[in-house]
């Protein structure tokens, strides 16, 4: 029986890295359903609106990360492809590549130490300004202190994420996935306990704090501390020049990431301000499940970034395309399957008149949100493939998408409500994302593999 399960998993391309990453996503999806039940049971409709809008406001950290985490993984993978592991904690090989790898670590520490403090300040200010202005509960909802805790825990996560990105670039994707899975288990159970205990909006912040403390313990009380110390001390004359190498690439990635905020994170704040906390809560709960499905299916692709980057650094384009095409088929199947299950689950909840079913969006706007999630599986996969070349050809589509989606969300949301908002987003994803994205993928892939030599 076990051998049969292993064969089935291998058929779907599930290696150890994908297994642990997917296990985390599956756990997140499964426990997410239970969490949704707890949110619906222990929070009012208004509190639910605050709960999910918190996440949309916290997502402004995108403006501070500026895509650097993904860049760290890619650049580290490029350098490590020229090195070898002498032991569990030491790399050897070309001194120039070791020095460049060390310089990436120095750069990451410096960048995030400065930006982290600024992020905390902005989160605190923006949250208080927004919720004080649009809070219609008349003081019935206590959100001030929960927001402070969430701001601090989000900043702590912001400082930890580049460390995990660096470790992934070293080829230890499986190890990072295991740590995140452990963190996910603890955080989820703490959220449930907090909600049952009646602490309301404190639940997310408190659970995040303890989950991050666990992650820090896993990172710095084992071999990773020695790995970072050895890499830190390997700095020589050869360095990765931020202005010469990273910035020309990062500013394009940064604009694309910032554009993603205006595309994906405006729904909740706009609905909170125009239609109230209850409708914003329906959108938030729907997005929570849809994002969980996408996160699960995209783990097939994201765990391959170090592998793709290594193939590109060694110009093994045939192997690159073989792995990518196979992975895309597997991940898109998982995505479609998850969306189908979700639709029939919500249908069943409403058919049997269960209260939880009404906490999601109505069927038409739900469908208008599901279609883009499936198409984004392809768009994001094509973008990942091309970005592993240290290039960002999706800059213009991202900027156009951010502008058009923002206008669509604000204008259609104001005059036609959630139906107009979701329909506009769906149409823009089909034409501005999927069709345009496929054209870019095919043309750039053909151009780069024939004419460009990558270092």
Image (cartoon, rainbow, N blue to C red):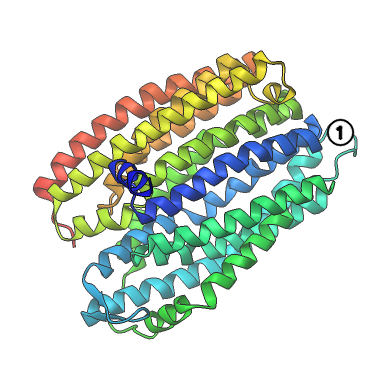
Q: Is residue 204 visible?
A: no
Locate residue 404, reporting x and y percent.
47, 27
Residue drawn at x 58%, y 33% as measured from the top left = 287
Classify residue 326 as left or right of residue 1. left
Classify residue 54 as left or right of residue 438. right
- Front residue of 378/405: it is 378
Q: Residue furthest left?
A: 450
Locate residue 362, reporting x and y percent.
63, 17
Where disc 1 sits, the SS reads: loop
Q: Is residue 90 above or below residue 321?
A: below
How many numbered discs sit on the rendered protein? 1
Locate residue 374, reporting x and y percent.
41, 28
Residue 92 appears in which quarter of the rendering? bottom left
Locate residue 410, reporting x and y percent.
60, 25
Q: Is residue 418 above or below residue 178?
A: above
Classify residue 221 as left or right of residue 48. left
Q: Is residue 204 above or below residue 87?
A: above
Q: Is residue 44 visible?
A: yes
Residue drawn at x 58%, y 16% as measured from the top left = 363
Q: Is residue 72 above or below residue 305?
A: below
Q: Specify few, some or many for label 1: CA neighbours under 10 Å numbering under 14, 14-19, or 20 or more.
A: few
Residue 4 appears in which quarter of the rendering? top left
Give the quarter of the figure containing the N terminus.
Answer: top left
Mark 1 highlights which residue?
Answer: 137
Give the quarter of the figure containing the C terminus.
Answer: bottom left
Residue drawn at x 42%, y 25% as measured from the top left = 429
């Amino acid at each position: 029986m076990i051998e049969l399960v292993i064969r089935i998993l291998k058929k779907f391309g599930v290696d150890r890295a994908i297994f642990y990453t997917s296990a985390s996503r599956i756990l997140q999806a499964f426990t997410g359903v239970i969490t949704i039940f707890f949110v619906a049971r222990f929070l009012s409709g208004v509190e639910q609106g605050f709960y999910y809008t918190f996440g949309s406001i916290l997502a402004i950290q995108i403006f501070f990360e500026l895509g650097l985490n993904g860049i760290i993984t890619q650049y580290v993978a490029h350098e490590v492809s020229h090195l070898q592991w002498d032991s569990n904690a030491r790399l050897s090989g070309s001194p120039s590549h070791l020095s460049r790898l060390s310089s990436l670590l120095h750069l990451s520490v410096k960048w995030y130490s400065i930006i982290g403090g600024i992020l905390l300040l902005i989160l605190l200010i923006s949250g208080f300004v927004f919720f004080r202005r649009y809070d219609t509960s008349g003081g019935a909802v206590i959100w001030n202190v929960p927001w402070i805790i969430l701001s601090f825990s989000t900043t702590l996560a912001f400082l930890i994420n580049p460390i995990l990105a660096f470790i992934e670039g070293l080829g230890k994707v499986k190890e990072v996935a295991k740590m995140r899975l452990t963190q996910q288990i603890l955080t989820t159970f703490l959220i449930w306990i907090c909600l049952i205990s009646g602490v309301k909006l404190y639940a997310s912040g408190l659970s995040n704090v303890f989950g991050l403390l666990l992650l820090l313990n896993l990172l710095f009380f084992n071999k990773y501390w020695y790995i970072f110390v050895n890499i830190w001390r390997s700095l020589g004359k050869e360095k990765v020049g931020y202005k010469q190498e990273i910035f020309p690439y990062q500013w394009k990635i940064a604009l694309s990431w910032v554009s993603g905020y205006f595309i994906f994170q405006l729904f909740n704040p706009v609905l909170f301000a125009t239609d109230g906390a209850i409708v914003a809560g329906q959108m938030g709960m729907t997005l929570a499940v849809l994002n969980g499905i996408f996160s699960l299916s995209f783990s097939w692709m994201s765990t391959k970034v170090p592998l793709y980057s290594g193939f590109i650094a060694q110009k093994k384009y045939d192997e690159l395309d073989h792995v990518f095409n196979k992975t895309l088929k597997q991940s898109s199947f998982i995505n479609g399957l998850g969306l189908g299950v979700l639709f029939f689950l919500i249908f069943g909840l409403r058919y049997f008149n269960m209260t939880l079913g009404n906490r999601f969006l109505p069927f038409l706007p739900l469908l208008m949100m599901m279609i883009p999630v499936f198409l984004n599986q392809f768009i994001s996969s094509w973008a990942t493939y091309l970005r592993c070349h240290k290039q960002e050809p999706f800059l213009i589509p991202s900027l156009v998408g951010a502008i058009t989606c923002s206008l669509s969300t604000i204008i259609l949301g104001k005059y036609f409500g959630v139906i107009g908002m979701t329909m506009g987003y769906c149409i823009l994803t089909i034409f501005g994302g999927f069709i345009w994205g496929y054209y870019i993928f095919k043309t750039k892939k053909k151009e780069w593999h024939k004419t460009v030599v990558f270092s």
